[in-house]
Image: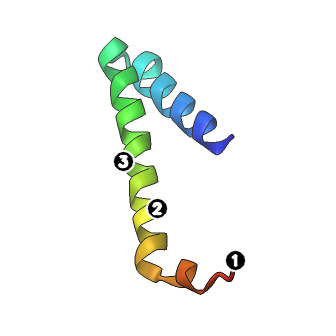
């Protein structure tokens, strides 16, 4: 759900509010993917995921 909200709000803001058009929409999607990558990397580096028992 947060993926959709973040991607749509960034794309809408860049594409329509700031008047960047189609380029702004694509830029919003790319920025959302980049932000998600940073968050996933931070979780990976923290290493707490290795202690989970399955």
Q: Which residue is mark 2?
A: 39
50 sits left or right of 44 in the view: right
Q: At numbered mark 2, what does the secondary structure look like: helix, strand or loop?
A: helix
Vertical order, 7 against 38 (above or below) = above
Report crowding for label 1: few under 14, some 14 to 19, many 20 or more residues within 10 A (C-alpha): few
Name above or below for residue 31 compared with residue 51: above
In the rendered view of the protein, which quadrant contains the N terminus? top right
| Residues tagged 3 and 1 counted as in contact (Cβ below 8 A) | no
Q: CA distance from mark 3 to mark 2?
A: 9 Å
Q: How many numbered circles are shown?
A: 3
Q: Give the class, few, some or many, for how many residues have Cα within 10 Å of label 2's Cα (few <14, many ≥20).
A: few
Point out the tag, 1 or 2, that comes first from the N-terminus.
2
Q: Nearer the viewer, mark 3 or mark 1?
A: 1
Which residue in the rendered view is the most extreme toward the top? 21
For mark 3, what is the residue?
34
Quadrant position of residue 25 = top left
x 41%, y 19%: residue: 15
């Amino acid at each position: 759900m947060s993926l959709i909200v973040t991607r749509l709000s960034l794309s809408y803001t860049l594409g329509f509010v700031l008047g960047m058009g189609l380029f702004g929409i694509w830029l919003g999607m790319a920025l959302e993917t980049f932000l998600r990558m940073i968050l996933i990397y931070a979780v990976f580096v923290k290493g707490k995921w290795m202690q989970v028992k399955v």
